[in-house]
Image (cartoon, rainbow, N blue to C red):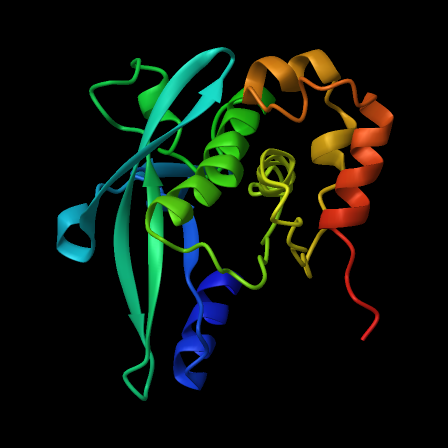
Amino acid sequence: MLAGDTLRAAADLGISMIAVTLMHRQGYFSQSLDASGWQHEDPIPWNIERYCHELPIRTDVTIEGRYVQLRAWKYEVTGCGRHVIPVLLLDTDLDENSDWDRTLTNNLYGGDSHYRLCQEVVLGVGGVRVLRALGYNDVARFHMNEGHAALLGLELLDESAKSSDRSPLTPKMCKRFAVAAFSRLILRFLRGMTGSQLIKSSVRFLDLISLIITKCFAVPAN
């Protein structure tokens, strides 16, 4: 709700913005209570093509040494003054991916911590790559809502490491810093999960965590 309200307000105000999220094919559900008072959820299918249209670009991310293909769908939020903010929904449900990888964008809160981390790679790393594939190379600031996009900072640092002409951008996360998304990971696990060139360097793990927190999660004093 918070992210949706933010986009609606930005559209009403005419702010230049683009949003990136996951295509939650099973993101809607009905709730019911049983005789004991326990809550149960039943998925509600929704027609993606009715609300979104598929974009012609493809990109990929590396998860545990394998390439996972991504596509993007576009939804438009229109403000009261007809200003439009595009919303990109990342989707791994492609024939090129394994059966398990195809489910990575199905649910917002589904599976275990391993499933969640794979989603973070898709959204954080894949989100930046989709933006670049669509020509968004001059984004002034990234805002991360919750911890799902935490690895966005790693991808921006990776971009900087590959290009001496570009310094890392500074994302601002104003809801929760999600430092725990990094603190529980070990260097070898991140290497295998993301395939990041930055992770493959000789940077010590603690130095890397410090760098990410300093460069990516600092909120300006003003």
Q: Nearer the viewer, residue 118 or 152?
A: 152
Q: Total marks drawn?
A: 0
- Residue sitting at the far front: 165
Judging depth in this view, the residue of 79 and 72 nearest the camera is 72
x then y, percent, for residue 175: 68, 58
Is residue 150 left or right of 49 when viewed as pictured?
right
Along the horizontal axis of the image, is 12 left or right of 200?
A: left
Left or right: 222, with 151 as reference point: right
The answer, for residue 47, to whether it is visible in the render is no
Q: Residue at x 69, y 61 (%)?
A: 174
Residue drawn at point x = 50 percent, y = 70 percent: 6
| Residue 100 found in image quarter | top left
Residue 34: x %, y % from top left: 42, 37
Compared to 158, does 114 lie above or below?
above
Q: Which corner quadrant of the image does residue 78 belong to?
A: bottom left
Image point 35% across, 41% down: which residue?
Answer: 90
